[in-house]
Amino acid sequence: MDKIDIRTRLKELAGRVDVALGDCCDRYLNGPERLVGAMRYSLEAGGKRIRPVLVMLSSEVCGGRMEEAMVPAAAIEMIHTFSLIHDDLPAMDNDDFRRGRPTSHKVYGEAMAILTGDALLAFAFELIGRHYEGTAEQKGRLMAELAEATGAGGMTGGQVLDMEFGDATRGLVEAQEVHRLKTAALIRCACRLGGICAGSEEEALGAVSEYGMKLGLAFQVVDDYLDQTSSQAEMGKGVGKDAAMGKPNYAVLTSPDEAWARASELICEAKNAIGRFGAKGEALMELAETVLRRKS
């Protein structure tokens, strides 16, 4: 599969995620009109949909069918969206733009943005609990994995460490722990959700887990690199804030060149992890390469 093909396929898969998100909202989402509108505003902001696409591709590489992984794929995108809404708040990163348009709190106010994130978090688990068509055991495993990656030992814990990072004694080791929890944990989770949907054996699940962790770490290092070298127009959000705010940015703590070298190393490690699947893993191999080509 060449690079043109993977770009086309990723765009097609992201489109399928968009349709699934809209369908889930149309069929299952109930609540006050303003809250529902705020949830849709952030969900419909677009993006590459990397996490749900990883659920789908990981299910496929482990021998499952993408269609059977669509509910967990939609759920993890809701978790990701909730995290972005809260991350953008004045009490956190205080960003006015996300994906090229005003952030939730700039449109709906801070209180509604907090509640919108809360509602998306709850909706994600409702989707799996009520509407995933796998076995009861699979439902339980999916929800446990998603909760672990979202909570104190995952994304939320990573955000706490991120907020505490400004202490002068913090360095590269601490920054990497922030990256592992705040970003990589949920990307790893996406790969594991796909494997669980496929009913994969532990060896295959371990391979996609390792791939997801390395990919997630690389994704954040590239994000750090772009924060220092890109523009707001290219990124669709504010840039250059990490150094001023004392944030754990790999490119600030080392250099942009060293950050790029580290990201390239991590992508090689991710590809090695998925190598056991042979030709079946080609899409995941190519997806890993796209992380190094991303501009936003």
Image (cartoon, grey):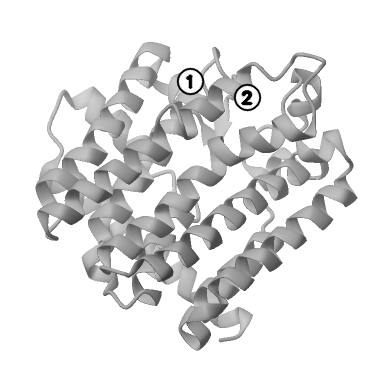
Counting residues from the N terminus, which is met first, the one under dot 1 or under dot 2?
Answer: 1
In the structure shown, which secondary structural element does the residue marked by tag 2 occupy?
Answer: helix
In the figure, is residue 135 to the left or right of 170?
left
What residue is shown at x 34% (from left), y 17% (from top)?
Answer: 112
Q: Is residue 161 above or below residue 196?
A: above
Pointer 1 with pointer 2, Cβ within 8 A: no
Camera-nearest residue between 149 and 257: 149
Please say whether residue 100 is visible from this viewpoint: no
Q: Position of residue 32 (x, y in %)?
A: 16, 23
- The circle drawn on residue 162 is 2
State the separation of the CA atoms marked 1 and 2.
Answer: 23 Å
Quarter of the image where the N terminus is located? bottom right
In the structure shown, which secondary structural element does the residue marked by tag 1 occupy?
Answer: helix
Q: Position of residue 124 (x, y in %)?
A: 26, 40
Task: Using a 10 Å C-alpha cutoff, classify the residue at mark 1 as few (fewer than 14 neighbours), some (14 to 19) or many (20 or more).
Answer: some
Q: Amino acid at mark 2?
A: Asp
Residue position marked by numbered label 1 in the rendering? 106
Q: Position of residue 289 (x, y in %)?
A: 65, 69
